Amino acid sequence: MNNKPNRGLVRSEHRRVRSGEDFDIIIGFLGFWALVLLVVTVWMEVTVQPALGWALGLLATLLALYGMIRLRRRLPERTATRRN
């Protein structure tokens, strides 16, 4: 095992895996807010309050989520383990 510190350098194979993981985190974040906005929009509609702004926010979030999922598919598959 190499005991030298990496001084913040990341090998190329780790960079590729991290990139996919970052996309997964962003997709999860957008998915959470899409769910929150869906609940708020439905609640605003049921209580007969103006919901156009909430619905447009939901639309923007869903479009961003769709775009991130499409970009994520182009990245290489994640590996289950990382080499140390």
Image: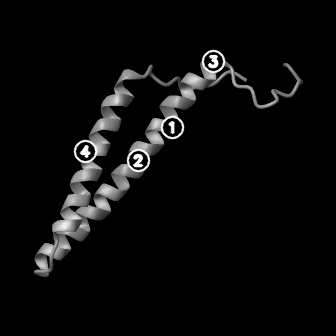
User: Could you tell me the amino acid type at mark 1?
Assistant: Asp
What secondary structure is found at the residue carrying circle 2?
helix
In the rendered structure, which disc, 3 or 1, sits on the residue that comes first in sequence? 3
How far apart are labels 4 and 1 at the CA level?
Answer: 18 Å
For label 4, the residue is: 63
Q: Nearer the viewer, mark 2 or mark 3?
A: 3
For label 3, the residue is: 12
Q: Quadrant of residue 43?
A: bottom left
Q: Residue at x 48, y 30 (%)?
A: 20
Q: Which mark is residue 28?
A: 2
Q: Residue at x 23, y 66 (%)?
A: 54
Q: Quadrant of the C terminus?
A: top right
In the rendered image, residue 14, in percent from the top left (x then y), is placed at: 62, 23
Q: Nearer the viewer, residue 56 or 71?
A: 56
Q: Which mark is residue 22?
A: 1
Query: Callout 3 environment at 10 Å: few (<14), some (14 to 19), or many (20+)?
Result: few
In the image, is 20 to the left or to the right of 34?
A: right
How far apart are labels 4 and 2 at the CA level?
Answer: 14 Å
How far apart are labels 2 and 3 at the CA level?
Answer: 25 Å
Query: Callout 4 environment at 10 Å: few (<14), some (14 to 19), or many (20+)?
Result: some
In the rendered structure, which disc, 4 or 2, sits on the residue that comes first in sequence? 2
In the rendered structure, which disc, 4 or 1, sits on the residue that comes first in sequence? 1
What secondary structure is found at the residue carrying circle 3?
helix
In the rendered image, residue 32, in percent from the top left (x then y), is placed at: 37, 55
In the rendered image, residue 66, in percent from the top left (x then y), is placed at: 27, 39
Q: Quadrant of residue 17?
A: top right
Q: Nearer the viewer, mark 4 or mark 2?
A: 4
What secondary structure is found at the residue carrying circle 4?
helix
How far apart are labels 4 and 3 at the CA level?
Answer: 31 Å
In the rendered image, residue 82, in percent from the top left (x then y), is placed at: 63, 24
